[in-house]
Amino acid sequence: MPGFGPYQALRLIGRGASSVVYAAAHRGSGAAVALKVLSAQAEGDGGDDAHRRFLDQARIGARLAHPDIAAVHEAGRQRGCAWLAMELLPGCELTRYTRAPRLLPDALVLQIGERLARALAHAHARGVVHRDLKPANVMLDLPAGTLKLTDFGIAGLADASRTRTGVVLGTPLYMAPEQLAGAPADARSDLYALGVLLYELLGGRRPHEHASLGELLRQVAQQPAPDLRTLRPGLDDAAAELVARCLHKQPSSRPADAAALADALQVLRRRGSGGGAGPMQNPALPDGCAAPPKPCR
């Protein structure tokens, strides 16, 4: 297994479109980390831009210290490869709970949304916009009650939604209309993406889905999302309306900021659960998502 900087890779645990990830250990302290290495294909396709965005994760990570944001420890280049060491995350991707029969209870979804909104508020206060919030970038361990927002790899420090070469960054299914139109992403774009994520967790589908990118762009720009209550009968009206506000076509009509959204979600959750906060777990679920550690992609 390869070594990078002070870290020794132990086993391959993930492979994405742009990187490979190893479970690794620090040679000195023995501390367990996830070691993410930019793939040769990504380096070849993206050149200097790919390297810059990859290593920016460490720079951005240094600005973010929040219990619900995955920690990035350090990064470097070795033998022509860019690498970074990050927190090794237990649990599984939130994607696991976006389709029946694994949809989560309303109160738990609202709690997940509240915690993600507070993590975003922390990032936004430091000038960092995530720009690629989606279930695959959230790790959830229900028995432990831990949640981690990951992959600030295309996050911007008051930057635009495109690379220097004009390539749009992000995942179109979760991108706000203004992002898809090429406008700079800002904090309100992240709120839209969080709205898509909450819609999917509650409704078992995304508000706009189409095989054609062109049709998807048209739907996101022009077509209102179907009423979430048609997919989630019994959902609190105020919860459905709050998600719809996040999905508003006009950024100015979304919640004022991530902190305000978190507060609104907290009120809804406490009202629905009789006032108690409650643990982030549900023993009645068919599995507790206690999978081996799987890092962000």
Image (cartoon, helix red, strand yellow):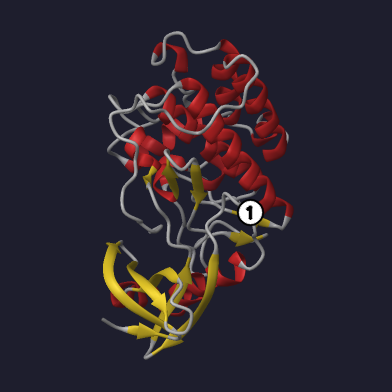
Q: Give the image location of residue 42, x and y in percent.
A: 34, 72
Q: Give the image location of residue 250, x and y in percent.
A: 63, 32
Q: Give the image location of residue 62, x and y in percent.
A: 63, 68
Q: Give the image location of residue 123, x and y in percent.
A: 66, 53
Tell me the SS state at disc 1. loop
- Measured along the vertical axis of the image, is residue 80 above or below residue 169? below
Q: Quadrant of residue 290?
A: top left
* Residue visible at 49% across and 31% down in the picture: 198
- Measured along the vertical axis of the image, is residue 232 above or below residue 193? above
Mark 1 crowd level (few <14, some 14–19, many ≥20, 10 Å Cα):
some
**What amino acid type should be assigned to the residue bearing mark 1?**
His
* Residue visible at 44% across and 50% down in the picture: 137
| Residue at the spot of label 1 | 66
10 displayed left or right of 171: left
Find the residue positioned furthest to the bottom.
Answer: 79
* Residue visible at 44% across and 22% down in the picture: 105
Q: Quadrant of residue 58?
A: bottom right
109 displayed left or right of 214: right
In this orientation, does residue 44 appear? no
In this orientation, does residue 168 appear? yes
Q: Quadrant of the N terminus?
A: bottom left
